Amino acid sequence: MKPNDSLVRLKEFQVNEKRRQLQQLQTMIAEFERMSKELEHQIGLEESRSGISDPNHFAYPTFAKAARQRADNLLVSIRDLKTQQDAAELALEEALAERAKAAALEGRDTAMRARA
């Protein structure tokens, strides 16, 4: 096995790993957004059932208050995950560029060996 061939395979593995990480982040974001929407729906139902929609009201439903806190926590998590997603997209672009360089290097070496 040629050294550049193993380098290309290593870079391909790194690209696939970056893609997998990015996909995981996207899946988590989608799941958290779904959970947040479901909580918002439940909050709306609880508020309409109780007739109180002001979270500062003394008789505001405890369930709605807790669900609102969970929804807020999910939104913070989503924001953090989106930051991680941006970093993962950048890392993927860099890995793709490195793989392209390794492939070009392998192609050049193969062409040089063919001439010799």
Image (cartoon, rainbow, N blue to C red):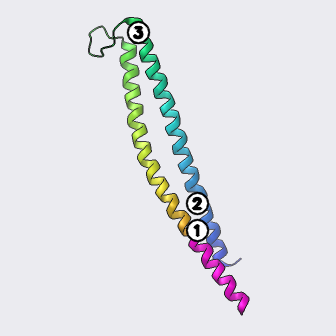
Disc 2 residue type?
Val
Q: Where residue 116 sits: x, y (%)?
A: 71, 93
Disc 1 residue type?
Arg
Q: Is residue 62 above or below residue 74?
A: above
68 horizontally vs 95: left or right: left
Between marks 2 and 3 in the image, the one whose residue lies nearer the viewer = 3
Q: Is residue 10 above or below residue 48?
A: below
- The answer to which of marks 3 and 1 sits earlier in the sequence is 3
Residue drawn at 56 percent across, 73 percent down: 101
Q: Tell me, yes or no, whether the highlighted magenta stretch contains residue 115.
A: yes
- The answer to which of marks 2 and 3 sits earlier in the sequence is 2
Q: Where residue 8 sits: x, y (%)?
A: 63, 70
Instruction: Return the mark for residue 99.
Output: 1
- Specify the segment rendered in magenta: 99-116
Question: Element at badge 2?
Answer: helix
Q: Tell me, yes or no, whether the highlighted magenta stretch contains residue 27.
A: no
47 horizontally vs 112: left or right: left
Q: Residues within 10 Å of mark 2 (few under 14, many from 20)?
A: many
Q: Is mark 2 in CB contact (under 8 Å) with mark 1?
A: yes
Q: CA distance from mark 2 to mark 3?
A: 50 Å
- The answer to which of marks 2 and 1 sits earlier in the sequence is 2
Question: Element at badge 3?
Answer: helix
Instruction: Return the mark for residue 15.
Output: 2
Q: Where residue 1 sits: x, y (%)?
A: 71, 76
Q: Residues within 10 Å of mark 1 (few under 14, many from 20)?
A: many
Q: CA distance from mark 3 to mark 1?
A: 56 Å
Q: Which residue is mark 3?
A: 48
